[in-house]
Amino acid sequence: MELKEYMQILRKRIWIIVAFVAVACIGAGVKNYFFTVPIYEANAKLIVNQAYNAEGVPSLDIGSIQTNIKVINSYMEIIKSSAILDKVAATYPDLGMNGNQLAQNISVTTANESQVMSLTATGLSSEKAAKTVNAVAKVFESQIPVIMKVDNVTILSEAKPTESSRPINVNPIVNILISFLVGLLLAVGFVFLLEYLDDTLKSEDELEKELGIPALAVISKIKKEEVRGSKQTTSQKQVGDGQYATVNQ
Amino acid sequence: MPRLTNDKGSLVTMANPKSSSSEAYRKLRTNIQFSSIDSQIQTIMIASALSGEGKTTTIGNLAVTYAQEGKKVLLMDTDLRKPAVHRMFNVPNHVGLTSVLSSQYKVTEVLRETDVEGLHVLSSGPIPPNPSEMLGSRKMTALLENLKEEYDVILFDTPPVLAVTDALIISSLCDGVILVVSAGKVKKDLVKKAKAHLEHVNARILGAVLNNVQVPKNRIADYIENV
């Protein structure tokens, strides 16, 4: 098998490949535009920083920073605990979510060795996502002094409803591109499978090899224009006997 | 059941002798002659595993090329179940081979001339209830002996090998058998089976014809057509 033969196999069943790819792309497009509930994301950043030490003098020493970084891990847990989220649900009834639902919709991450926590919420609209994340951030900020007996969380940036105006899960270009590639891959595989399963005689070499008899002639499909040459029009039905051949005996 | 394909008009050798397809049939004729240097090949039958592989078209065009070479050719339709030769050459078929075998007519009364000089056709005649017995009869053998004296080449169109035994019966009366294979249509196993059937009855298979090959028009074909 040479590359040329592979190309020929593909060219022979090009319509299968085209159909596969078209169906995959259209399917992806339809799913994207009609069957996907768009989900929006918004995020806020919180910084954990001991603003003042015991004497009320601003401090920024390595020791306290390390402590803050250590404490972030606890804060990430706390922010997702019911202590905070139930309070959020109670304070902002217009979100229409209870503590558990909130827990599913928010996630907290932190860059390694930094004092910044990133809080992300998802929602069915960008406003709602932003509202949710801001509500959680505010409640967390106000609750930390109560829980930890230390006031060291400040909101660094709030989510703005407009900045995340594009849904995170609707990405038609990428999706259609992926389905195009997958469709192409499947189609090519399918075509080769068909070729492999096709156990008919197709070529002169094959015929001679399989049957062990010489191929006397290879006749291509007779095209219409070849026969058009000087075709007699025999539309009239002959009645009675045609011409008889005489044999000299 | 009528055939879906229209046999009339597939005689490319008659309509357009310069075309590349006609050239392919001439090549077939030449190769048959070369395949038997020691023995004279006078009676040739066409065979295929299944129906619709192009037996009638091939044997019809081969008959025309033989006639164009100046030979006296007889094309016999021994497909007594679904005869097609008469339609291809546009001759009537209310009498034919079966009328001769059942002693209703003399062979001289049912032989037909065609539009091709030197090519005569013996159509199948009315479809009998017992085709195999008719073809295997002594009368058939005797008839063939007579015809051999009159014609340089006698060609037979037959039913598919795997369908009925008729083709095998005819093969025992022939000097050579050509197996037609329709490219990409028949499974290898079936073609092998057909070949085995023929070999089993000691038929002499001259070779095969690969039919209905789809090839892009190449420059050689163009050259031949424009000579």
Image: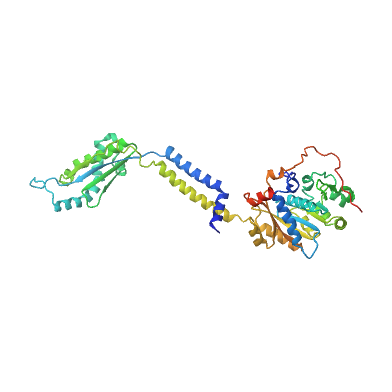
Horizontal arrangement in the rendering, residue A236 relative to residue B20 (left or right): right
Relative height, residue B88 to residue B45 (above, below):
above
Question: Which image quarter: residue B149?
Answer: bottom right
Looking at the image, the residue that sits furthest to the left is A55
Q: Position of residue B59 (x, y in %)?
A: 76, 52
What is the image's colouring? rainbow
Q: Nearer the viewer, residue A224 or A175?
A: A224
Looking at the image, residue B6 sits to the left or right of residue A49; the answer is: right
The answer to whether B177 appears left or right of A119 in the picture is right
Spot occupied by residue A170 in the image (x, y as percentages of width and height): 39, 41
Q: Is residue B223 visible?
A: yes
Q: Quadrant of the C terminus of chain A?
A: bottom right
Q: Report x, y in % for residue B207.
A: 72, 60
Nearest the eye: B197 or A16? A16
Residue B162 in view (yes/no): no
- Which residue is pictured at 49% across the width and 49% down the height? A184
Furthest residue toward right: A249
User: Can you give x and y, in whole percent of width and height, for residue A230 in the image?
Assistant: 74, 42
B153 to the left or right of A16 = right
Q: Nearer the viewer, residue A235 or B165?
A: A235
Residue lying farthest to the bottom in this orientation: B38
Quadrant including the N terminus of chain A: bottom right
Residue sitting at 16 percent across and 51 percent down? A65
Residue at far top of view: A94
Observer-nearest residue: B198 or B45? B45
Disc tally is: 0
